[in-house]
Image (spheres, grey):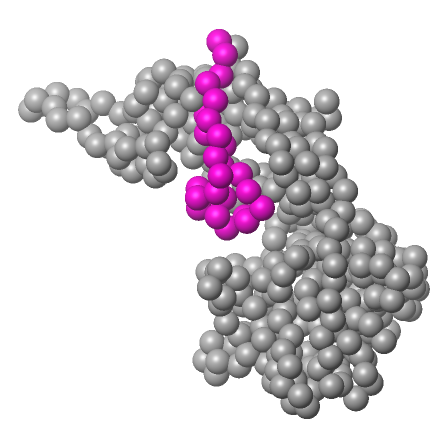
């Protein structure tokens, strides 16, 4: 078994008063204060636990199995069960609306979850709830876990002809995405493998080249021969030859829509921030800007490469686009082109 990490979840400093807490989810009910006789001190429900949800994890192309252990340090009630919410949609899991499984720990606090029939090369997210007889504790939203199944998603990528002057064809989806509403994989510039978590290392060393070649071009490696990452000039051509707008799809994805000025065909870019070394970039209530890598290193700034940058401007309603020098260790989306 591979040791992933341990984490003190809702540890000793976290005490919740039952009279102040409302619990969500299909298997939870609202906890209300118990009526007391006059001059009788009120009673609070509390639980201090040390929780290591994914201490040991086994990952294959289509399954994730992990053991965990919970240590109850102090509690007003008795431990009942642990519920795990999971899925490939981080927002749904964060809102406790993904698929879920529940298990009852043994006397030592050990428990195990097994998830099968997953897609290979896909990031899955996890959030936990611990239920006691008198209170339910929920894992903090900022600490949602992620695990990536092994392998690479097999996708038959398609191209759209936007009538661009160079004749360049653009992929209709990101690398690792099955449709235009999915972000797919995030990459550090020049990396040959996609990022598998929510953070990257600032110590990453990018290839010392001015322009990526087939051996370190994520689009070529993942999409196959004939595909490559767009150059800075390719992105600039796209910026200048389509009309951009920003919106939310019926499934809840935020996208930038580009309509060709030549033949009115469309291209969609998912708007989903970036992945940094401390957290996922962005602090808005919805993702309002995005980065996509080009294959070109910045000639003006050391340690940076040229990226497409798009940002929604609420006051004007416009989606502004430009090329921007961006740190090579940061994780950005990748879109392939054919020439």
Residue at the (44%, 42%) spot, across then down: 96
* Residue 197 at least partly seen: no
Residue at the (65%, 31%) spot, across then down: 64
Tell me how many marks there are: 0
Position of 331 with respect to 259 (left or right) is right
Report x, y in % for residue 324.
72, 73
Residue closer to the observer: 128 or 221? 221
Position of 311 with respect to 62 (left or right) is left
Query: The C terminus appears in which quarter of the rendering?
Result: bottom right
Residue at the (55%, 42%) spot, across then down: 87
Query: The N terminus appears in which quarter of the rendering?
Result: top right
Position of 55 with respect to 73 (left or right) is right
Quarter of the rendering containing residue 37: top left
Report x, y in % for residue 277.
69, 50
**Position above or below: 67 against 308:** above
**Position above or below: 283 against 3:** below
* Residue 175 at least partly seen: yes
Span highlighted in magenta in the image: 82-107
Quarter of the rendering containing residue 151: top right
Report x, y in % for residue 203.
80, 49
Residue closer to the observer: 162 or 33? 162
Report x, y in % for residue 55.
63, 25
Residue at the (39%, 19%) spot, across then down: 80
Q: Is residue 7 magenta?
A: no
Position of 52 with respect to 164 (left or right) is left
């Amino acid at each position: 078994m591979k040791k992933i990490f341990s984490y003190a979840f809702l540890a000793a400093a976290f005490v919740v008063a039952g009279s102040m807490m409302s619990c969500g989810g299909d298997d939870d009910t609202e906890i209300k204060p118990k009526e007391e006789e006059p001059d009788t001190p009120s009673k609070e429900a509390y639980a201090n636990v040390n929780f290591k949800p994914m201490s040991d994890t086994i990952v294959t192309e289509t399954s994730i199995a992990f053991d965990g252990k919970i240590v109850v340090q102090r509690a007003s009630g008795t431990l009942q069960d642990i519920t795990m919410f999971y899925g490939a949609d981080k927002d749904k899991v964060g809102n406790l609306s993904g698929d879920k499984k529940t298990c009852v720990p043994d006397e030592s606090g050990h428990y195990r979850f097994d998830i099968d029939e997953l897609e290979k090369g896909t990031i899955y997210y996890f959030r936990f709830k611990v239920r006691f007889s008198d209170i339910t504790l929920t894992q903090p939203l900022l600490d949602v876990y992620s695990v990536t199944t092994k392998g690479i998603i097999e996708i038959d990528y398609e191209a759209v002809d936007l009538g661009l002057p160079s004749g360049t064809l653009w992929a209709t989806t990101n690398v690792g995405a099955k449709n235009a509403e999915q972000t797919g994989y995030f990459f550090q510039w020049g990396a040959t493998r996609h990022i598998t978590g929510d953070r990257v290392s600032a110590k990453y060393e990018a290839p010392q080249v001015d322009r990526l070649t087939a051996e370190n071009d994520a689009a070529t490696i993942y999409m196959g021969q004939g595909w490559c990452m767009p150059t800075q000039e390719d992105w600039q051509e796209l910026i200048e030859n389509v009309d951009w707008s920003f919106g939310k799809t019926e499934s809840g994805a935020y996208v930038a829509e580009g309509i060709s000025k030549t033949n009115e065909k469309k291209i969609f870019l998912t708007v989903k921030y970036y992945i940094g070394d401390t957290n996922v970039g962005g602090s808005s209530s919805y993702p309002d800007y995005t980065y996509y890598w080009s294959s070109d290193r910045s000639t003006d700034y050391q340690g940076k490469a040229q990226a497409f940058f798009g940002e929604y401007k609420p006051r004007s309603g416009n989606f502004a686009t430009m090329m921007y020098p961006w740190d090579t260790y940061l994780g950005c989306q990748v879109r392939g082109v054919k020439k």
